[in-house]
Amino acid sequence: MRTSYRIRTMAVAAALLVAASACSPIEPWVKPYEREHLADPIMALDRSPISSSYIDHVFETREGARGATGGVGGGCGCN
Amino acid sequence: MQLRLTRRGAARAVPCGWCVRATAALLCAGIPALAGVLPEDSVDVMYHRYQGGGITVQGPSILVQKRLGDHFAINAQYYQDMISSASIDVMLSASPYKETRTQKSAGAEYLHGKTTYSAGFINSKEPDYIADTSYYSLSQDMFGDLTTVTLSYSRGWDQVFRDIKVNGQIINDPTFHQRADHRVYGLSVSQILSRNLIGTLNYQFSTDEGYLASPYRLIRYVDPNNPVGYSLATQVYPNTRTMDAASVSLKYYLSYRAALTGKYRFFTDSWGIVAHTLQVDYVQPVWRHWTLDSNIRYYTQGAASFYSDLFPYANYSNYMARDRELAEFHSITLGAEASYAFTIPHLTWIQKSSATLSFDRMMIHYLDYRNALYSKYDPGVFKAGEEPLYTLNANIIQAYVSIWY
Amino acid sequence: MRNRIVALAAILLLALPAWAGAAGDVQAPGFTLQSVDGKTVTLGQYKGDVVMINFWASWCGPCRQEMPLLDDIYKQYKDMGFVLLGVNVEPDASNANRWLKKTPVSYPILYDPKSAVSQLYQVQAMPTTVIIDRQGVVRYVHNGYLPGDENQYMNSIRSLIVQ
């Protein structure tokens, strides 16, 4: 697959996700007041950025593979 | 003037110059970790140490995060690798060396409603490699804050030099100045699946262009005229590389207050490498102040199409490499971490603090990379191509203090 | 070039601000909950007062940040026919009680462990603040908390107190 095709696919996928969430008839199944476990610090997707960036770096210098290691989301959903 | 090329050899330690570009993608993946919330004000000070395979890399890492108002946050990081390398690649064709790589980065985040914009810049410098990276990402919470979609882009500009020894001094070879460009595109979706379960899908596409090899590494080919049975030659890499990586992860909250994470990543690239990564992580707070974490990671990789430990003859193909990072191998890493949360009574501006010690043991078994030092030092006993397969065991230590203010 | 336009369009779509709903002329649903002091509290017993309901949890940072300021508001207006009810939404009250011991407030705190009242009031964010006038009509709903929002609360309360 060419570069331009991949970039377009990613952009379209992101846009579709936004559109789907705006028009969706499905109600969010976890209410804001039900997020006590998700808000717990141990449930953070990245508990220590300084540590995860270091260890990812160690692996990437020893291995051929790289990427797709991050995660943004979860948490208390406050505000 | 006598020009003697000091061949630093392969395995330019962790992190080696030509592997530095990975750092950018990691740092921008690491910093905005929570959806719709700016990071808390904090300082982390770390000592890190990697030791294995004749290489020791250690140094400090300092990360500062600060909110400015309610919508804006900045971060800055200083990182250093002090490398002392006598790896088997170095010992094969060069001499042990020491060098320091310094990396500085700065970034900012802006939160507006459900959207987080972030951008930053990273500069990495060592005697023969300079890497500059800029990164940008946009993160959007949606669907009742259950879904977070993140788009990211990073761009890297590398300058590759080659060290030579002139009159006892190490300088950059004036005839050697190459460039490499990197572009990374990422799309990530995290989804809260239940009160106790969050899932993440990650896709990353990257392209590299330019000088992608190491100026020091060599390949070997069968040469009956040579007493060791082989001769060395410069390696030749393609000057482009496109990579695809996709991962899925699930994190589950256990009712007695612990969390279990499972992750799988698939990687493939235009060099013919296919790799699988599987990781399981378990974290549990215990007693009043401690948090314990243990994890196991399994990684398996198929070799690049132009890789060989021993080519049958000189100029065997257009592209030839003997870098063990491109070889066929599998590895297991076992990790354990203990963190202690404490308060400092007299310093009221400190909200909370913790001290963490983390230990990882990485064990790599190469399936088509041999320890050529055996035939170098015992040519009668070990024929070229029949030396034992190489195994690398490394110990990785992280010790850090985190303060939230 | 086309890819850049597509990518930019996707980014702009993603950056659309959140749409927040507004309160209409709705009678505040009645409820009965236990308070921290062990008393039974009903919304109906405050008919004729301006009532502010604040939904909060100990795990919610902005909630904790807001509560001392709510306490100040309560102390300022409580003798003018105003009451503030803090509704804690946690199924297990022990974390909330521990936090209240460290950071006590003087206004009534009620437990909603089964999320009955949160569902009744269609709570969309944490924290959520609802202000009800003397006739029992919901006049103001605020999702979340950012420093400075307490001024909006006070403006709302002042306009309702004089009615």
Image (cartoon, grey):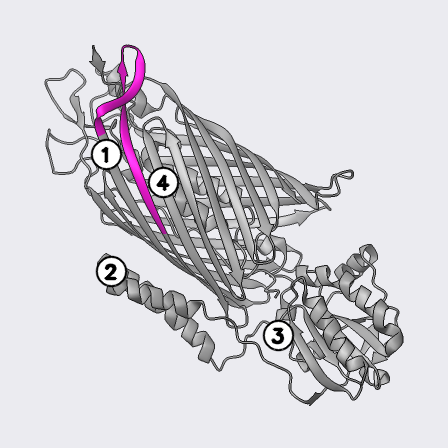
Residue in front for this viewpoint, A53 or C108: C108
Q: Which residue is mark 2?
A: A4
Q: Which residue is mark 3?
A: C124
Q: Quadrant of residue B201?
A: bottom left
State which quarter of the image contains the C terminus of chain C.
bottom right
Q: Are marks 4 and 1 on the same chain?
A: yes
Magenta-colored span: B154-176
Residue B132: image tag = 4
Amino acid found under the numbered disc labelled 4: Asp
Q: Residue at x 35, y 26 (%)?
A: B127
Which mark's residue is nearer the viewer, 1 or 2?
1
Question: What is the chain letter for disc 1?
Answer: B
Q: Position of residue B269 (x, y in %)?
A: 26, 49
Q: Position of residue C120 (x, y in %)?
A: 69, 82
State which quarter of the image contains the N terminus of chain C.
bottom left
Magenta stretch, main secondary structure class:
strand
Q: Which residue is mark 1?
A: B178
Q: Is residue B327 at all visible to an observer of this figure?
A: no
Q: Real-space Cα distance between discs 3 and 1?
A: 55 Å
Residue A13: image tag = none
